[in-house]
Image (cartoon, coloured by chain):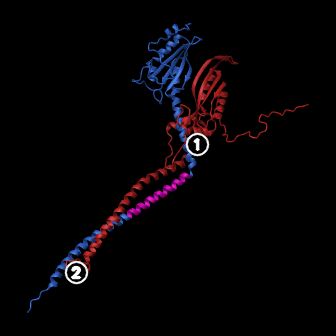
Amino acid sequence: MTSFNEFNISIFLATRKQMATAIVLGVSAVGLLLFGLVPQVQQVFDLRAELDKETPKLLQLERKLTDLENVKFTPEFGQADLVDAALPSKKPLLELMMSLSSIAVETGVVIQDFEISPGQIASDSAGLEAIQPTVRARGASAAVGYLEFEMVIEGTFSQVQDFLILIEKISPFTTINTLTLGVQAATNAENEPLIESRLATKTYFFTQPVKTTVEAPLPKLNNQDIAVLEELASFVSSDLPEQDEVLGGGLEDLFNVEELNFEN
Amino acid sequence: MSKTINFVGERRKRLDLTQRKDYEILKKVVYVFVAVFAVFLIALGTRLYYVFQVRGVLDEQDTIRQVISSQQQTELDYNVFAQKLKQLTELFGVRKDKQEAFEFFSQVFGPEVIISEIDYSSSSNDILQFTVQAPSVFVMEQVFATLDSPEVKSKFAGISKSGLSRTSQASYNLTLTVILATPGGPVAADPNAPASNEPGELSDPAIPGPLDADFDPAREILESDEGFTP
């Protein structure tokens, strides 16, 4: 027998439909709040944070794209060849020799003796040095390596002076490391005293691996960089075409010596 | 007439009262539900708005990335160009400091004194070493006086004198080591810097030691083995 106090769902639904509806709506509201609204609001905050994070990236990318499109037409980048000539990405042995030869001819000095230890000349070795700091020359910066060159020059005082001024204005970038002015050696045809000078120079080349990401902005040039570019425009360059093939292979007579004929 | 008892009437009254209360509760619950649902719809709309915004930004980023990637060669060339230029600026800066110092010393001693040797090869970029050559001991004395002058001391705080010698041509050589205080070039004397002849002012062992503070070049040369020929 059913107890009188026992809850009867049928009677409850029949007599208290509004309360039943209120309970259902109340439970639905709480469910909507807990499982619908709270996650939605949470996601709104997450999305807003993501938008705040991504919008500056977009602006940065747009700025980079604009810079990249404009940079091709900047006068500075138009002088990239000058910079490449002044600081090549390989050991600039031939370029150095050509530049030295041209300023020696221009100033009238005679290069009596020279000594150079270029090591491995191939451009790959420059790249190898960059990734193996232990084999890098002592004193070289992380981004550049250098070729050391020693020579003895002879000329009148003004010729030697001009040569010393011009040697620091050649491409590839060269600096005088040590300089010794010798005593008067002889006189020239005009009876002007000739002096000897022994100098050691350093010629720099670029060894730094350049890495960048899509998001990374383009590097900005400051006034000092632009001043250097202007200075580089007056540098003496060898204008030596880049050699990318070995010439002379397969020749039968490299020295053009006539064949010997033996006669009996 | 018999007395009747209406059991249902009392119950009906109670039921009506309960149902009125239920209705009031239902109205409040409906308001709450509608409010929650409205907020839910607003949140849903806001979320959808942000989803489209984020998707738009990400899509635009991808598009720009693709355009940037298509210009990879230009970017690479420009980066190499800029890095090389930065390195050249640094090399020019170091060289300019030494050139300015050298130019100053080649003029300050007068026309009789020549700079016969220069050495930029110190491991430190801030040190310049050179040798001055004077034709007589009297000119060398003037060199010492010039080095102690306020004009020189105000420009270069650290000047070390060493290696005084007399050549077979009767000229006198003196090696000077100049400390360029900052990479920005010759600067005013640092009051805290050691005096030019104080021992231990140079840390590079390759550089010869300084001379004594009470060094007299004329006396030293006269007492040297090589002798003095006026």
Query: Disc 2 on helix, strand or loop?
Result: loop
Q: Amino acid at mark 1?
A: Gly
User: In the rendering, which numbered label is found on residue A2?
Assistant: 2
Is-magenta flag for residue B62? yes
The residue sitting at the left extreme is B1
Q: Which chain is red?
A: A
Secondary structure of the magenta portion, mostly?
Answer: helix
A61 lies left or right of A125: left
- Decide if residue A207 is in sight here: no
B122 vs A72, nearest the viewer: B122
The residue range painted magenta reads: B45-69
The residue sitting at the front extreme is A1
Crowd band around label 1 with a 10 angstrom C-alpha radius: few (<14), some (14–19), many (20+): few
A96 vs B227: above or below: below
Is-magenta flag for residue A234? no
- Decide if residue A154 is in sight here: yes
A195 vs A170: above or below: above
| Spot occupied by residue A197 in the image (x, y as percentages of width and height) | 62, 21
Query: Disc 1 on helix, strand or loop?
Result: helix
Q: Residue at x 56, y 50 (%)?
A: B71
Whether the residues at callouts 1 and 2 have beta carbons within 8 Å, the answer is: no
Q: Residue A10's image quarter?
A: bottom left
A195 vs B73: above or below: above
Task: Give the colour in which the image draws chain B.
Answer: blue
Indicate the chain on which mark 1 is placed. A
Residue picked out by circle 1: A78
Q: Quadrant of the C terminus of chain A?
A: top right
| Spot occupied by residue A220 in the image (x, y as percentages of width and height) | 50, 42
Q: Residue A4's image quarter?
A: bottom left
Q: Residue A76's image quarter?
A: top right
